[in-house]
Amino acid sequence: MFDKVLISEDHESSNYSVQIVLEQLKISNVDHVYYCDDAFSYFKKSLKTKPYDLLITDLSFEEDHREQVLKNGRELIKSCRDVDPGLKVIVFSAEHRIGVIDLLFKELGINAFVRKARSDSKDLKKAIESVYDNEIYISQDLHLPVKSMNTLEFSNYDIILLQLLSDGILQKNIPAVLQEREIFPNSLSSVEKRLNAMKLVLTVRSNEHLIAYCKDLGII
């Protein structure tokens, strides 16, 4: 089992519940903090002695009187992974938008996502055990949606198209914007083909519904 774990969670009750789960797993070498800057400071100091095996962090951190450089879990994970790419990471969050969760796995390479909900302590325990065995873990109620999202595989190009539509650019005018930015492919047929593919997979009929759906998912 993991030997040294760092908890980054700004809500005292959630922070404590994570500590209890680690105690149940007989992990005694645990540090817990309430700010991302403190977490990164602890992480860097650990590299000089005994590095952490696992980081468990929330995504959202409430702002208060204390000025922070790292303002959320995404920034903390990226900063830690830039220093130690092999660090195992579990996100423990109330986030439920599938697009946001999917991007955490794709862009940050997290090892597990546990949604704060009923029985989340049991869920977190399973996640820790799975990640220790080098497995990817996602809360059970999120399995099917995430798998469905992966069939589409939103690319940077897709997100650019969606953002342009969201900004009020007409579909027929998107190629000109892409050409100006030197983004390829930039023909009208390519744009139409990709937007139609997204609408087909997400089972929406119009660009307006596509944008609304993707906003709900957290993709844009």
Image (tube, rainbow, N blue to C red):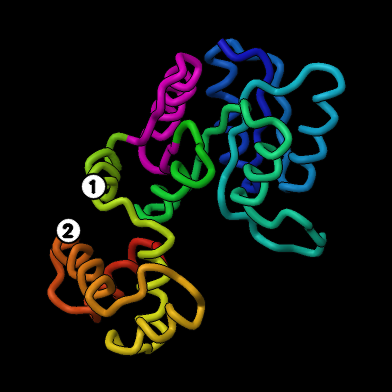
Circle 2 residue: 201
Check disc 1: other Cα within 10 Å, few if <14, some if 14-19, many if 20+: few
Position of 199 compared to 115: left or right? left
Q: Which contiguous range is marked in magenta?
A: 113-139
Nearer to me, 202 or 7 = 202
The mark nearer the N terminus, 1 or 2, is 1
Nearer to me, 183 or 202 = 183
Q: How many marks?
A: 2
Q: Amino acid at mark 2?
A: Val
Q: Are marks 1 and 2 in contact (CB under 8 Å)?
A: yes
Q: Would you identify the image quadrant in which residue 172 lies?
A: bottom left
Position of 114 compared to 30: left or right? left
Nearer to me, 43 or 122 = 43
Q: Which quarter shows the N terminus?
A: top right
Which x, y percent locates residue 105? 45, 41
Position of 155 compared to 77: left or right? left
Q: What kind of element bears circle 1? A: loop
- Residue 36 magenta: no
Q: What kind of element bears circle 2? A: helix
Which x, y percent locates residue 104? 47, 46
* Alpha-carbon span between mark 1 and mark 2: 8 Å
Which x, y percent locates residue 65? 80, 64
- Residue 124 magenta: yes
Q: Would you identify the image quadrant in which residue 166 lies?
A: bottom left
Q: Residue at x 48, y 31 (%)?
A: 111
Circle 1 residue: 151
Check disc 2: other Cα within 10 Å, few if <14, some if 14-19, many if 20+: few
Q: Residue at x 34, y 56 (%)?
A: 154
**Disc ID at residue 175:** none
Q: Residue at x 43, y 60 (%)?
A: 156
**Above or below, comparing residue 157 to residue 27 in the picture:** below
Q: Amino acid at mark 1?
A: Thr
